Image (spheres, coloured by chain):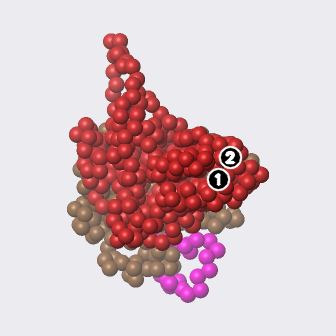
Chain colours: A red, B brown
Amino acid sequence: MLDTINEPLIIAEPTSTQLSYMDAIVQAQKEEMLRDERVVMIGEDVSIYGGTELVRSFDENRVRNMPISENSFTGMAIGAAMTGLRPIVDLTIASFTYLAADQIINQASKLRYMTGGQIQVPIVFRAGMYYKIGNAAQHSDRPYPFFMSAPGLKIIVPSTAADMKGLLKSAVRDDDPVMIFEDCNLWAKKDLVSTDPDFLIPIGCADIKRPGSDVTIISIGACLPMVLAAAKTLQKQGISAEVVDPRTLVPLDKEVLIRSVAKTGRLVIVDNAHRTNSAASEIAAVIAEEAFESLRKPIQRVTTADVHIPFSPVLEKIVYPTAADVIGAVNKIQ
Amino acid sequence: MSLRKSDHLEMYRRMQRIRIFEEAVKTLPVEGHLSIGQEGAIVGACMALRDDDYITGTHRSHGHPIGKGATLAPLMAELLGKVTGICRGRGGSMHLADFSVGVVGESAIVGGGIPLATGAGFSAQVRGTDQVSLCFFGDGASNQGTFSESMNLAAVWNLPVIFFCENNGYAISTSVGKSHGQPDIAKRADGYGIPGVIVDGQDALSVYKASNEAVIRARNGDGPTLIEAKTYRFEEHCDNLNILIPYRSQEEIDHHVTNRDPLVIYQAALLAMPEINEKDLDSITAEVVTEVQAAVEFAQQSAYPDPADLYQHMYSTPIHYPA
């Protein structure tokens, strides 16, 4: 237990540092585990996939390596969340969330409501999206849209190291179950991240990554670097694209999205999920329902095709959205 | 811990509460899965627990919170979908979870509560308390992956969990004989390196004894135990279930109702004790009848939830949802 310390606390000036997306994940967890002894980390092979630092920093009581039983260790963490802990569950490859989906959806998402608010389930489910690396269809899913259909979950898809750190820390401090979909294609990507241990980005807030006036491009997750490159090319064509990153898919920051579309009158949504029932589909429906009068042209979705992710690199590289697709979609509605 | 007179009377009271509560439910417009016939298993196990220990229930779970000591009125109100219900009318018959007595959920997904109970044990271990977690589940749930996975997890981490199987012989209409390669579910414990115990679930005292040993083991840090209580469900799987092809004979049902009623068996055991007499038991029964009547009246007189509150309890802080 924490003793009262009478010595004056030395508080370092919060600064920023260049940090990779992967290091942001590790730091966010480490800081939250240091801050709150109720935070525990469980998952398979926790000492790899970026967990080495956590295994070194905390004992086995706080960082637990699990047998390959995704549904039950997820449920175990949910039971722990209901009885005083704040677990982070690392489900590693996002395709494994299907195995844990029973406990995530039937228990974690529903129990607060089903018990009339008697309990809360403060838990974070981490899922890594390991695609574009020749892993074939059973290791390459981007399954966040499935979970958007389950009320009771909060769903975040950070696209930068700073967003990852600030949102993951908010997720750990949140009293509801939060799913955080990480993108392995961003692991090495660095940007400026605050070192303030209380640096938080609120869940449910979109971010305008690039201001513009002619078209809104809503970019989901790791589409961002590609979308920003496309926006640069469009600028050369004389088209000013505003790039908006929702960052949180549930709850969706409708206000910022609608305000941007009201300004530009045109909307392209870029999403690495499969086309049918993608996050792009839901956002398109929201804008069509609530901001139709702002639109000068039909909404365009740029998504992964409704086909399984093939192994052969020749096939795999053609299934995901590209900058050329984004530029094509923007030009289509000029 | 050996039972004192007051413990015996409390055990009898809780068994009667379940029986009389369920008899009242039969007269109400509630489609419920009744615990009648399984009171000895439920209460025998719960009496081995402390108030701050955890349990999880099943879809047939009116009895579990009552066995753990819950107040009846909010449970009855929940069955009628009232706002005064223990879950504010959001849960219903298969989810009578009363967290104030340590119920960490009742799951209508068969086997869904087993990982949750394991997690409550995990939590106690991490937090360094000596609480234990007892998981109720049925013979049907023992064929779910969560059963095997959770027993292994508890064994690997030496968690303070008691896996308590109420084997009532049937998963709806499918018998244990037709769905289990090994009909003695407790024998599966061997595969996970933990003790497995078979006990007569109609004999509350035997259940208590086995449960108490498992609880002591768990509390001492010696890990999980699997207990299989052979019991019997006296009623149909649930009310209004129209099963056209009989799956158990009337003779079989009659045999259990006549000769294997856990309340009758426990009454006989109590009356054989010099310190307990018929008057003690009769006054408990009368008190429970009054308590159940009051619970029914409370439930009937309570209001339904306000439709304006449909989204209440979805999130810790209300979010702009869905509009």
Which subunit holds the residue at mark 2?
A
SS assignment at label 2: helix
Q: Position of residue A159 (x, y in %)?
A: 46, 46
> For residue A204, which numbered disc appears in the image?
none
Determine whether, in the image, residue B179 is placed left or right of residue A152: left
Query: Residue A147, position in %: x, y?
Result: 52, 58
Residue range (magenta): B225-252
Q: Which quadrant: the C terminus of chain A? A: bottom right
Q: Residue at x 34, y 65 (%)?
A: A135
Separation of marks 1 and 2 at Cα, in angstroms: 8 Å
Which quarter of the rendering shows the N terminus of chain A? top left
Tag of residue A264: 2
Residue B117 visible to an observer of this rendering? no
Given the image, on which type of amino acid does mark 2 rest? Thr
**Residue, x 37% and y 58% (percent of image)?**
A130
Label 2 Cα neighbours within 10 Å, binned few <14 / some 14-19 / many ≥20: many
Residue, far front? A237
What residue is disc 1 on? A267
Residue at the far right: name it: A293
